[in-house]
């Protein structure tokens, strides 16, 4: 039986990591957590402060067999 996947059926989630001078301060933040923390940190530590948004496919995680 063939499985028909369309891009519209795939759910993606994202997580955020915040760095100060290439050192990870916060990892795996959801969008709400990121917005709060980034807003507060950026006003004080904007020099050297960066973030990374990582997207992953929730369906792949749900189908893991191990």
Image (spheres, rainbow, N blue to C red):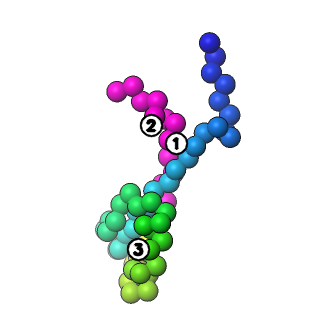
Q: Which residue is drawn at 47% across and 66% down?
A: 32
Occupied quadrant, residue 27: bottom left
- Residue 1 position (above or below residue 50): above
Quadrant containing the C terminus in the rendered view: top left
Q: In this view, does 5 lie to the left or right of 32?
A: right
Which of the labelled discs sits on residue 57, or is there none? 1
Quarter-of-image position of residue 23: bottom left
Q: Do the residues labelled 2 and 3 touch (CB within 8 Å)?
A: no
Residue under circle 3?
Answer: 37
Task: Using a 10 Å C-alpha cutoff, classify the residue at mark 2 as few (fewer than 14 neighbours), some (14 to 19) or many (20 or more).
Answer: few
Q: What element carries label 2?
A: helix
State if disc 1 and disc 2 touch (CB < 8 Å): yes
Q: Residue at (50%, 46%) from the top-left corner?
A: 56
x then y, percent, for residue 12: 55, 46
Specify start and end residues of the magenta stretch as a single range. Answer: 53-66
Determine the secondary structure under disc 1: strand
Where residue 31 appears, as percent x and y from the top left, is 49, 63
Q: Position of residue 63 (x, y in %)?
A: 46, 30
* 58 magenta-colored: yes
Residue at disc 3, secondary structure? helix
Residue tagged 2: 61
């Amino acid at each position: 039986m063939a499985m028909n996947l369309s891009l519209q059926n795939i759910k993606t989630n994202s997580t955020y990591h915040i760095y100060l001078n290439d050192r990870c301060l916060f990892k795996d933040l959801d969008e709400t957590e990121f917005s709060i923390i980034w807003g507060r940190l950026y006003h004080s530590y904007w020099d050297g402060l960066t973030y990374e948004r990582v997207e992953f496919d929730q369906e792949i995680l749900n189908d893991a067999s191990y």
